Image (tube, grey):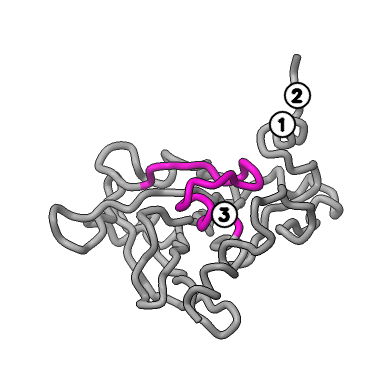
Amino acid sequence: MEFDSYEYQFLMTGIPPGYRFEPTDVELLQDYLWKKVNGEPLPYNIISECEIYGNQDKEPWNVFIETSTKTFYVFTKLKKKGKGKNIDRVAGCGTWKGQKTDPIMYEKMKIGNRKLFVYEVKGSNEGVKGHWIMHEFSLVDEEDKQIGDYVVCSIRNKNAKDDTDDEEPPMKKMRFNSEDHNPPETTSSACPLQTLLSDWS
């Protein structure tokens, strides 16, 4: 049996055709990363686990669809350089260079960080430098220390031109986030992030 792209999307993620995954920063931390770090079931299979760092075949165009204008969301586990505290950001023939870090706030309290990276090829001043951009989302505790080794990354090629996007009707641009569906029942009436915040107070 063959499926078109929209049927395949529904089978793999449970998200109906016509919706786009555009979560807020807080939604990424509360509904996805927090559950990933704690081994809890995720609401959808929309975010997969993927190694984006390494020396071989880890250039972003080898991991993701180079011609797509879409943003790719993945969980990845950070690895430190040797016994130090610095994270190894090497990816194939280049590296992800940090640009800036912004705090993610929830009810006037910092719950995580959003870091901006650009991909740069070693020894090159042209080509893909700056074309691939990434936002890395991480959870932090009350002492501003990262919670767990996992982060969520949103990655896209800002210079990509996907001709198929022009063929989609306007109704395909509907926004999707965690408020648009009934999330799975949890064992507690309070969400994990609210519980965490109450423990801090």
Magenta region: 31-52
Is there CB contact under 8 Å for labels 1 and 3?
Answer: no
Judging by the rendered image, the residue that carries numbered circle 2 is: 3
Can you tell which of label 2 and label 1 is closer to the viewer? 1
Cα–Cα span, label 2 and label 1: 9 Å
Amino acid at the residue labelled 2 = Phe
Residue 46 forms part of the magenta stretch? yes
Indicate left or right for 101 with 26 as reference: left
Residue found farthest to the left:
83
Mark 1 or 3: in front is 3
Judge whether 51 appears above or below 69 on screen.
above
Question: Disc number at residue 11?
Answer: 1
Q: Is residue 136 magenta?
A: no
Circle 1 SS class: helix
Percent from the top left, x then y, of residue 67? 55, 44
Mark 2 and mark 3 lie on one chain; the one further toward the N terminus is 2
Q: Amino acid at mark 3?
A: Tyr
**Quarter location, residue 136:** bottom left
Of discs 2 and 3, which sits in the foreground? Answer: 3
Q: Secondary structure at mark 2?
A: loop
Residues at discs 2 and 1 in contact (Cβ within 8 Å): yes
Residue at the (75%, 24%) spot, across then down: 3
Q: Which residue is mark 3?
A: 32
Q: Is residue 98 left or right of residue 197?
A: left
Cβ atoms under marks 2 and 3 closer than 8 Å = no
Q: Amino acid at mark 1?
A: Leu
Q: Nearer the viewer, residue 56 or 151?
A: 151
Identify whether 61 is placed above or below 108: above
